[in-house]
Image (cartoon, rainbow, N blue to C red):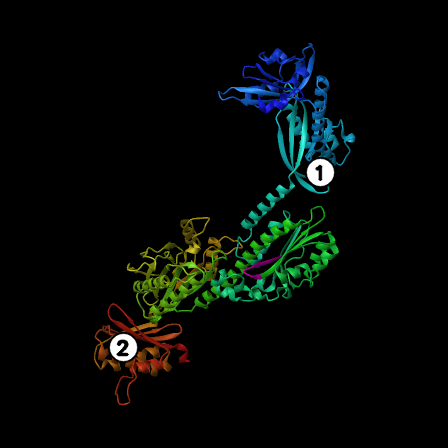
Amino acid sequence: MDANSDLLSPTATVPVAAVDAGGTVTLWSPAARHALGYAPGEVIGRPAAALLAAPLPPPALRALTRSTPWSGALTARHRDGGAVRVTVRAHPCPEGDGRVQWVLLGAAPEGVPPGEPDTVLEEAAQKDAALKEWAYVQSPIATAVYDRDLRLTGANGEMVRLSGRPEEAMLGLQLTEIFPGAPFDEFGRLMAQVLRTGESLRTDTFFRAPGQSRKRAWATFFTPLKDGDGRVQGVSIAALDRTEPHRARQRLAMVNDAGARIGTTLDVGRTAEELAEVTTGAFADLVSVDLLDSVLHSSVLHSSVLHSGDAAGGAGAGADDAGAGRPDAEPVRRAAARSVLDGLPGEPGGAFSYAPQSPPAEALASGRPSLHRAEAAAIAAWADGGGPALSRCLGGEGAHSVLAVPLGARGATLGVALFVRYPGTEPFDADDLLLAEEIAARAGVCVDNARRYAVERAVALTLQRSLLPGRLPEPTAVEVTSRYLPAGAQAGVGGDWFDVIPLSGARVALVVGDVVGHGLQASAVMGRLRAAVRTLADLDLPPDELLTHLDDLVVQLAQDQSAERLPGTVRETGATCLYVVYDPVSRSCVLARAGHPAPVLVTPDGTARFLDIPGGPPLGLGGLPFESAELQLPEGSLLALYTDGLVESHDHDIGAGLDGLRTALSGPAAPLERTCDAVLDALLPRRPERPKDDIALLLARTRALDASQVRSWDLPAERSTVAEARKFASEQLTAWGLEELGFTTELVVSELVTNAVRHAYAPIRLRLIRERSALICEVSDASSTSPRMRRARVTDEGGRGLLLVAQLTERWGTRFTAEGKTIWAQQPLAAAG
């Protein structure tokens, strides 16, 4: 009671009363007595409802039920019997037992003498009404009120300002009569819906208000206006300017969009185009991306690219990168340009330089972005070096705002991007500059990654091409042709390889392989494997034994890499390989494969099938055996060796690819070049992009040596057989018309047969082969001891035979067979002329 002593003092002007949870008056102040005329003893203890001349309004009843504060006007009964309009503020006071007591405060202006209740309450109500009117009129939120016919009854000052028309000119009109067209037609429909349903609505739109010069984002609220009985009597519209939050969301969305859409490929030009595509229209009206000439064309190999380990080294590592001590002095080229208007501002073309001290030139020189608002003519002058198209777009369209933002990464400036806005769009501001800088930074890193990748890819391709056969040999045994397609930029250069290796006895080895992985590492491993295959092929090892040695090499490579753990290298090395040896004399074909796809055999009648040969494990597993398969091939058979990139694709499984390969190879024999093209056309879709994996295809059509081209003799292991062997050889050379090779051939035959008689075992066989470009002499015996060429001393009577053979022939060597060994020597037929 002491706390409210001021309110209950005889001089207090604010009427105060209290009502308990049962609705009984428990407190009555002197000011309340003056307001309604009742003495405290006449009211306290009586029901409060007896003091009302009219029922409580619905809002008061809801507040009473929910125990929430309420304020409003009540019609009270004066002691003299008259009705008095009283403004009351009711506050709930919870009691500890869950019941609620109410404190009622009446409105009485300060300084008004007691005893004049009607005057006090009317003036208080007038003051409250004035405050509400001022809040409505002066609110920064544009508000307008429409009646049940959706005709304007009033608008506050902010709404009048946005409308651009005086309130008197709009009163009594519907919204669509005041402002026809979008978006007001939709607003009118929403107002009618609110009037019909009594439910509030909100819509978010971006448009130019009639009283403004720029488009802005608006959150518009449509609220039903209801009377005391809850019936809708009108609709209010409140428009809230949400431009800044809208722009913030747009900027964030653009940054996210740029992160997702810029840098999808490792191509410098495409990355620049993606930057222009993302920002044109959504951020700027015109975008031009110009890159340093050395960057766009990769004309300079940068030290930071060749030493990719310094990527994390920061600005110091790349300070001189891109040849950019002063990048403003280096010419640039237009990499991409887009505009919201018709026509591009200068297609990519020749090199040019921006005007000195112009914003683009300064951005290139300093590496800092800048914002400029200038006359169109001045802006156009900046781009004079960029060609007439860019100058026309900058000046002729009235460009008023430009951002010059450098593109850089790792401390190096790579180019500059210009973002331009035309009349009708708001000029760039400081926030736009920060956004452009963020997007350009991301684009710069992507451009630099693409540039570095382009250099590395060029190195890898150069290495790969140097390791692959530049020109296939033309062996007698087969007719060959090939195709090699490196993988696209995203996948990187792979480790596919193929080779054609002439062997002794007119035979030929065909090999196709595939190293796991991509890039320089895969190319380097491929080169080592190809060199190893050639070395092992020179030893004339059987295919299964050759793959065993190759498997050991791959295992050793994997162990070396695991020990070194060099940055950028794969931890494991694996490969597949198919090795084929074909003999045109016997028409036998021996094959072995290590995890590689089986070859296709096309017989002379045009039937194609995959050869059923043991698969074998991939190279690099170690310790597992390989198996060879041998078959006889008719003359004119076609062998197709390939890597999995030819038959595997993301849009079909490998089974469909193998079926397509067999179908493409089936049919009557055709020139090999045409067959190669037909296979690629059938299996590779005609798309501009490169395949996802390297593709190697090797086609070989077999030939057979006629019996007249091969002659052999079985010789006894006696000294007299040497002279007989010379006689056989001389007679055969005469029959072939190769008499001029007689002396050399007789000497070679004599030395080889003599060695066989002295150091080997029977049976001894002499064989002469006349192929297209060489004469081959072979002597076979049953010994597995390899002959060794040595330099004889002056006093030695022998030991010079193999040295003479090596000096007189083009090539010579030894191969081991199941029965022993064969020593062979080859002379070019051109010597016969």
**Is residue 647 in view from this perspective?**
yes
Q: Residue furthest bottom?
A: 795
Amino acid found under the numbered disc labelled 1: Ala
Report the side of 783 relative to 296 (left or right): left
Q: Residue furthest top?
A: 81
- When asked about the image quadrant of residue 666, the answer is bottom left
Pointer 2 residue: 787
The tag on residue 209 is 1
Residue sitting at x 58%, y 24%? 3
Q: Is residue 756 above or below residue 532?
A: below
Q: Quadrant where the C terminus lies?
A: bottom left
**Is residue 671 in view from this perspective?**
no
Q: x, y (%) of residue 284? A: 65, 50
Q: Nearer the viewer, residue 70 or 473?
A: 70
Q: Nearer the viewer, residue 471 or 493?
A: 493
Report the side of 379 relative to 544 (left or right): right
| Residue 256 highlighted magenta (yes or no) | no
Amino acid found under the numbered disc labelled 2: Pro
Q: Earlier in the sequence, mark 1 or mark 2?
A: 1
Tell me the magenta residue range: 405-412
The tag on residue 671 is none
Q: Is residue 528 above or below residue 345?
A: below
Q: Report helix, strand or loop for mark 1.
A: loop
Q: Nearer the viewer, residue 431 or 77?
A: 77
- Please say if the residues under marks 1 and 2 sit with CB atoms less than 8 Å apart: no
